[in-house]
């Protein structure tokens, strides 16, 4: 990454150097003292915790400088230190200025779910043509995005960034740091309803990415999602549509589930078409792929440049990964997160896979607001509709899933309820038989990965 001198950082953040040589240079930036490495510039952010309380730890681990907003006693004499009014705003301003000094085009990706998968797919497709930077993990908020931008170098032609939100105005603030040349809206689903009154309000918050797109930018849009179409109907820029319906620039047709071999479909990419194989089980992942292909289409990549890459894509950890265990038990690790639409896609996508029994181990879906009970009841009904043989609920809300399953005909002895993933981890092994298919899925806060780790440890991954 490029080096930035202390005096240039102070200029860009409207701060004042209170100690250290102006020529002192930094190429690494951080906000978490636990992850500090040698030579970093540490931003003491005030959030749930005050970063100033961890300056000593950061310097002990090798930080060479800091950006602060309050007086701090006993700073190391050799450290470069800048004082600003607000350290978060300083971090964001620095990232914004760094991007302006580069010719890097920005791809901004938002949606209720599938942002990370779409980002990874798009990055894999584009990396063969462009030198690119991408968000690490799910660094998609007001802290993670500017830290990604500070890794920019002159060599990067494309930056592929997630833009997440849990409330209104958050995406707008991200587009002010990194205005997209290409904006992607994957979908609009009931997520974070705890912070919104309705799906329409979520849609308006997602619309902020369009409002923040550059004037000559392109929007890559899910044509099958009515709310996506609605918020984009008056947007005047170039639109690239993806989906399973007619009239899309990038389209999948004749979709066929091939069991554990994944999905087969016919890809329409502009005026070209070809039969494809895709190593994933859920239709939602197919939409993520089409969104990524929409980005490639917007950047004028040829059909030949992208078609050979699709079969190379592999599932990501904790997002629908197939794990073969002893006794021919097949575990689907989808423990990273959950929401009503993503869970529905998982239950449908796995229903036709061959197995002696299908067991759904489902944790609470969090942040669904006033409708949380109804969403869980409906999820339980979907378990039965999909032909699942057993439902194991994790957490207090999952009891409503069981209620929904029982109301749809599942027997009481086909359901189990546990308060936590830790409790379920101790019990789950007694429920499994040879040849079972097990789906583990739950919201991040439910830590359903503990169940996955127990199964892998005891049943020994093949």
Image (cartoon, grey):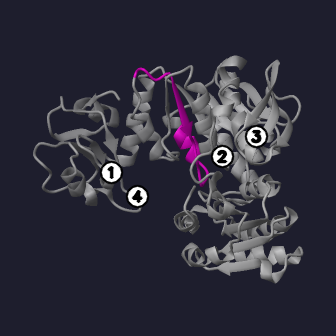
**Which one is in front in this view, the residue at disc 2 or the one at disc 4?**
2
Residue projecting furthest to the front: 327
Q: Is residue 297 left or right of residue 423?
A: right
**Which one is in front in this view, the residue at disc 1 or the one at disc 4?**
1
At a point 60% along the width and 76% down the height, the residue shown is: 424
Q: What span is in magenta? A: 154-175
At a point 38% along the width and 42% down the height, the residue shown is: 91
Sequence-first tag of 3 and 4: 4
- Callout 2 environment at 10 Å: few (<14), some (14 to 19), or many (20+)? many
Q: Secondary structure at mark 2?
A: loop
- The residue where tag 1 is placed is 35
Q: Is residue 153 magenta?
A: no
Can residue 354 be seen from the camera position used here?
A: yes
- The residue where tag 2 is placed is 114
Q: Spatial distance from mark 1 to mark 3, Cα to Cα?
A: 40 Å
Residue projecting furthest to the left: 77
Quadrant housing residue 434: bottom right
- The residue where tag 4 is placed is 47
Sequence-first tag of 2 and 3: 2
């Amino acid at each position: 990454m490029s080096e930035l001198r202390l005096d240039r950082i102070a200029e860009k953040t409207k701060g004042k150097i209170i100690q250290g040589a102006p020529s002192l240079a930094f190429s690494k930036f951080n906000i978490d003292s636990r992850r500090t490495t040698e030579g970093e510039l540490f931003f003491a952010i005030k959030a749930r915790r005050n970063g100033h309380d961890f300056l000593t730890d950061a310097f002990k681990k090798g930080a060479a400088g800091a950006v602060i907003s309050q007086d701090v006693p006993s700073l190391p004499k050799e450290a470069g230190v800048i004082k600003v009014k607000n350290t978060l705003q300083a971090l964001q301003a620095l990232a914004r200025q760094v991007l302006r000094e580069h010719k890097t085009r920005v791809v901004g990706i938002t949606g209720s779910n599938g942002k990370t998968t779409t980002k990874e797919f798009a990055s894999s497709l584009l990396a063969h043509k462009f030198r690119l930077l991408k968000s690490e993990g799910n660094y998609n908020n007001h802290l993670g995005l500017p830290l990604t931008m500070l890794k920019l170098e002159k060599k990067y032609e494309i930056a592929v960034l997630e833009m997440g939100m849990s409330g209104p105005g958050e995406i707008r603030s991200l587009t002010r740091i990194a205005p997209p040349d290409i904006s992607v809206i994957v979908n609009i689903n009931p997520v974070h309803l705890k912070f919104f009154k309705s799906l329409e309000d979520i849609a308006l918050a997602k619309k902020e990415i369009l409002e923040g797109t550059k004037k000559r930018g392109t929007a890559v849009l899910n044509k099958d999602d009515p709310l996506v179409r609605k918020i984009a109907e008056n947007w005047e820029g170039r639109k690239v549509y993806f989906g399973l319906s007619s009239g899309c620039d990038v389209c999948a047709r004749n979709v066929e589930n091939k069991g554990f071999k994944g999905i087969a479909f016919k890809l329409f990419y502009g005026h070209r078409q070809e039969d494809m194989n895709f190593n994933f089980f859920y239709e939602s992942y197919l939409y993520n792929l089409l969104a990524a292909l929409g980005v490639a289409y917007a950047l004028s990549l040829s059909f030949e440049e992208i078609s050979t890459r699709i079969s190379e894509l592999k599932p990501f950890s904790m997002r629908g990964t197939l794990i073969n265990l002893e006794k021919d038990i097949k575990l689907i690790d989808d423990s990273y997160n959950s929401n009503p639409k993503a869970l529905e896609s998982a239950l449908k996508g796995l229903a036709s896979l061959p197995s002696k029994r299908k067991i759904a181990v489902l944790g609470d879906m969090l942040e669904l607001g006033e409708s949380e009970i109804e969403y869980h009841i409906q999820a339980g009904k979907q378990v039965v509709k999909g032909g699942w043989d057993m439902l194991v609920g994790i957490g207090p809300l999952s009891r409503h899933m069981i209620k929904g399953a029982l109301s749809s005909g599942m027997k009481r002895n086909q359901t189990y309820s546990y308060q936590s993933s830790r409790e379920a981890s101790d019990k789950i092994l007694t429920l499994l038989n040879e040849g079972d298919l097990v789906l583990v899925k739950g919201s991040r806060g439910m830590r359903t990965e503990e169940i996955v780790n127990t199964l892998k440890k005891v049943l020994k991954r093949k």
